[in-house]
Amino acid sequence: MQQNSQKSENTEFLNKVYKNSKAGSDAISYLKDKITDQSLMSDLQYQHSQYQEIQSRVSKELSKNGEFPKEQSPVSQIGMWSGVQLNTLLDKSTDKIAEMMMQGSTMGIIDMARTLKEYPDIPDSSRKIGEDLIKLEENSMQKMKSYLS
């Protein structure tokens, strides 16, 4: 029974990592047509690929137990899309987009740090993915700082 509980916790943890990284990649996808700065576009495309790499690693870990990542509900996806549209309605500047990405990264770091503490007994391979997501968010914040005016 103990092993099933650990397996279940690992699945929950990995799904939270997936959800977190998917939110980041979705936000970038929703912002793509609003970006005019080529340097920002390049940085965000790289960040997007890194989120997808995290999602791929989560999928591989989950598949070891015959599991698949849980996709976000259409309602939460619409909520994020609406938020992006609303936040860029009057201001699509590079500064505004960088600020939005930094706010998202901050929320991601907080959420992932809490998730790591909430699941202390997950396998090291899963923990590493969560830690790598935090590093990605921290690095992304540093990049976005250069776009603030």
Image (spheres, helix red, strand yellow):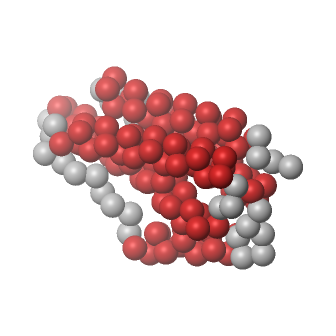
On the picture, is 59 further left or further right than 148?
left
Above or below, comparing residue 31 to residue 132 in the picture: below
Q: Position of residue 83 (x, y in %)?
A: 62, 71
Residue 109 location, quadrant: top right
Q: Nearer the viewer, residue 62 or 38?
A: 38
Name which residue lies at 78% across and 55% down. 95
Name which residue lies at 39% across and 29% down. 127
Name the quarter where the N terminus is drawn.
top left
Q: Position of residue 92 (x, y in %)?
A: 73, 67
Query: Does residue 14 appear anywhere in the picture?
Result: no
Residue 86 location, quadrant: bottom right
Residue at the far front: name it: 38
Query: Does residue 22 appear anywhere in the picture?
Result: yes
Q: Position of residue 93 (x, y in %)?
A: 77, 62
On the picture, is 148 further left or further right than 47?
right
Above or below, comparing residue 96 to residue 60 in the picture: below
